[in-house]
Every structure is written in structure tokens, then in C-alpha cells.
């Protein structure tokens, strides 16, 4: 059994999440652990993600932020997103990050595995891709442990993929 529970956020929960004032934690009855939301992430969530959720309700789960909650300590530890609904080939892209203070504990690997398994089994997804910089060893290890394979190496970006048959 996983220690992680994935929670796809509603628009209201995203607005609470970006406040970083524990109103998000209170809304989900989570323990208070200080966390900061990067200004760039705040802007993406409020100016890109929420409008897309409002305009494409059928694909809301492909736009929202999914928060990983460690059920053993009742705390949000990471966030993961799809970067939009599947394209014509059934492919989606992932983006993710572990919250400060929770890195190097296996949370992102567990979170990535859970969301990929869910997407490939229960959503119209055939392939999941992720991109990371060649110097981002932590992301590379997470993707590798999650079953992804490198399919392209460029100077500033490596592309990784996992398909239905890999889960």
C-alpha cells in the first residue's frame, strides 16, 4: 500500500494553495507545514491553469495540479501536473516537483508512478512523456525508477517516455 494519496485540486483549492497561509491545508484537514509557492508557479496556476480548467471542463484532470499527500504524516509533500490533455496520439506530458523539506525521500518517484499508473489505466492516455535537463540527476533517477526510458538527448533537454505496456 502506498503512503501517498494523490489529490487533484479544484479551482478553489488551487487558489488556496497559492496563498501559502495554511488555508489550503485547512481545506483538506492536513497538518500545517510551512511551504512557499514560487512566484512563477503561482502565476502559471492562476493565469494559465485555472482559465484552462474553466474553458475545458471535460479535460480538467489534465490541467489541474495533483498534490501528493503523505498519509502517514498527513502533509502535502509534492505536486505533479499534466501539461494538457492527450494529443492525437494519446500522449501527455508530465511536470512535477517535490516541496522543500521533503526531497530525497522517494516521494516524487512514488507520486510519478501513481499518477502514471492511474493515467494509463483509467484515462485516455497511451504514452506519458517528461523532459528534464541533462544536469538534473534527481529527475532522471525519478523517471528511471518510474519506468521511463530516454528517447532523445539534446544539449539542454532529455526526453523520456513510458507507454501503456510498461505499467
Image: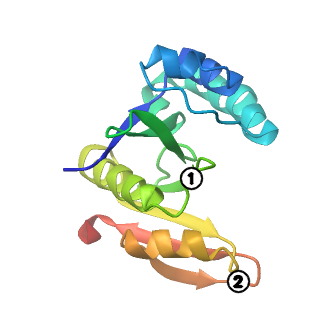
Please name the residue that numbered disc 2 is placed on: 154
Q: Position of residue 51 (x, y in %)?
A: 66, 23
**Callout 1: few (<14), some (14-19), or many (20+) C-alpha neighbours within 10 Å?**
some
Q: Name the mark on residue 41.
A: none
Element under disc 1: strand
Quadrant housing residue 165: bottom left
Which tag, 2 or 1, sits closer to the chain's start? 1
The answer to whether one can see residue 89 in this image is: no
**Callout 2: few (<14), some (14-19), or many (20+) C-alpha neighbours within 10 Å?**
few
- Which residue is at a point 34% across and 49% down the rendered structure image? 119
- For this orientation, the residue located farthest to the left is 1
Q: Is residue 43 left or right of residue 106?
A: right
User: Colour scheme used in the picture?
Assistant: rainbow
The answer to whether one can see residue 13 in this image is: yes
Where does the C terminus fall, quadrant-wise? bottom left
Q: Is residue 70 left or right of residue 130?
A: left
> Quick one: 113 or 154, which is closer to the camera?
113
Element under disc 2: loop
Q: Position of residue 91 (x, y in %)?
A: 45, 57
Please give the count of numbered marks on the rendered protein: 2
- For this orientation, the residue located farthest to the right is 39
Q: Is residue 69 above or below residue 121?
A: above
- Which residue is at a point 57% across and 69% down the rendered structure image? 139
Q: Is residue 12 above or below residue 157?
A: above
- Which residue is at a point 28% across and 71% down the rendered structure image? 166
Q: Position of residue 113 (x, y in %)?
A: 35, 59
> In front: mark 2 or mark 1?
1
- Asked if labels 1 and 2 touch by Cβ distance under 8 angstroms, the answer is no
- Which residue is at a point 47% across and 53% down the rendered structure image? 88
Please name the residue that numbered disc 1 is placed on: 96
Q: Position of residue 143 (x, y in %)?
A: 47, 70
> Alpha carbon of mark 2 to alpha carbon of mark 1: how far?
20 Å
Amino acid at each position: 500500500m502506498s503512503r501517498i494519496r494523490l489529490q487533484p485540486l479544484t479551482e478553489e483549492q488551487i487558489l488556496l494553495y497559492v496563498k501559502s497561509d495554511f488555508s489550503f491545508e485547512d481545506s483538506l484537514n492536513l497538518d500545517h507545514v510551512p511551504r512557499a509557492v514560487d512566484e512563477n508557479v503561482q502565476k502559471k496556476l492562476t493565469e494559465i491553469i485555472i482559465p484552462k480548467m474553466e474553458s475545458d471542463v471535460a479535460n480538467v484532470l489534465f490541467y489541474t495540479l495533483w498534490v501528493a499527500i503523505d498519509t502517514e504524516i498527513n502533509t502535502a509533500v509534492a505536486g505533479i501536473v499534466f501539461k494538457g490533455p492527450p494529443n492525437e496520439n494519446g500522449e501527455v506530458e508530465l511536470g512535477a516537483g517535490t516541496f522543500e523539506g521533503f526531497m530525497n525521500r522517494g516521494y516524487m518517484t512514488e507520486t510519478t508512478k501513481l499518477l502514471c499508473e492511474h493515467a494509463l489505466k483509467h484515462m485516455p492516455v497511451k504514452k506519458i512523456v517528461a523532459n528534464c535537463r541533462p544536469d538534473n540527476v534527481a529527475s532522471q533517477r525519478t523517471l528511471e525508477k518510474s519506468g521511463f526510458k530516454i528517447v532523445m538527448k539534446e544539449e539542454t533537454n532529455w526526453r523520456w517516455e513510458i507507454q501503456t505496456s510498461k505499467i
